[in-house]
Amino acid sequence: MGILCFSVSLVIIAVSLHLVLLKIKFRLSANPIIAIISIFFAVLITGFSLSFLLKGVYSFLPNSIWRYLQVLIFYVPVMLSYVITYIALEDDSPSMTIVRFVEQGEEKGRARKEIKQVITNEALILPRISIMLKDGWIEYKNRQYYVTKKGKSYNQFFAFGLKLLKISREG
C-alpha cells in the first residue's frame, strides 16, 4: 500500500507542477509532449533520489529495486495516459468538435447537414498539417508534401504497435 501511495503522490506532484507551469505560462518546450514527459521524469527522478536518501526513515518509500520497478509500472502508464488526455484536450479533435457543436444546438439538436458544414478540411485537416510541419513529420517542397525521416520513424513505430495489438488501419 505504501508503494501505491508513493506512486500516486508522484503523479499528483507532476500533474500539479504541470498545471502551475501552464497557469504562469512558463514554456518548458515548444512541444507539449516533451514538456509533460520532462516534468514527469524530473518528478520521478527527484522522488527516487529522495526515497534513496531517506531509505529506512519512512516505511512507505521504495527500498529495493523491485519496489522501484513497481513504482515505474504504475507511474509510466499514468504519465502516458495524462499525455494522451492532455493532447486530446489541447487539440480540437474531430469528435470533440462535433460534440461541442451538437451541444450548442441545445434542445433542437443539429442536422447532419449542419454538422457536415462545420467539419471541413480547413477546420480539421489543415491545422494538423501545420502541426506535422512544425514537428518535422512532413515537409513542403515544390507545392507537395513529403514525409521526413522523423515522420517515417513515427509511422513505423505506430504501425508496429497496431500490428502488435492486431488493430487494422482501416477506419
Image (cartoon, rainbow, N blue to C red):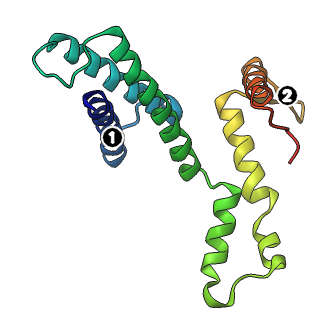
The amino acid on which the numbered mark 2 sits, given as a three-letter code, is Tyr
Circle 1 SS class: helix
- Label 2 secondary element: strand
Observer-nearest of 63 and 27: 63
Locate the N terminus by quadrant.
top left
Q: Amino acid at mark 1?
A: Leu
Residue labelled with disc 1: 21
Q: In the visual, does 71 lie left or right of 29? A: left
Residue 167 falls in which quadrant of the image? top right
Question: Are discs 1 and 2 less than 8 Å apart at CB?
Answer: no
Residue 110 lies left or right of residue 86; in this view the side is right
Q: Residue at x 77, y 23 (%)?
A: 160
Mark 1 / mark 2, whichever is N-terminal? 1
Q: Residue furthest bottom?
A: 108
Q: Residue furthest left?
A: 57
**Above/below status of 133 relative to 114:** above
* Mark pair 1, 2: CA separation: 35 Å
Report the number of discs.
2
Compared with 14, 119 (above or below) is below
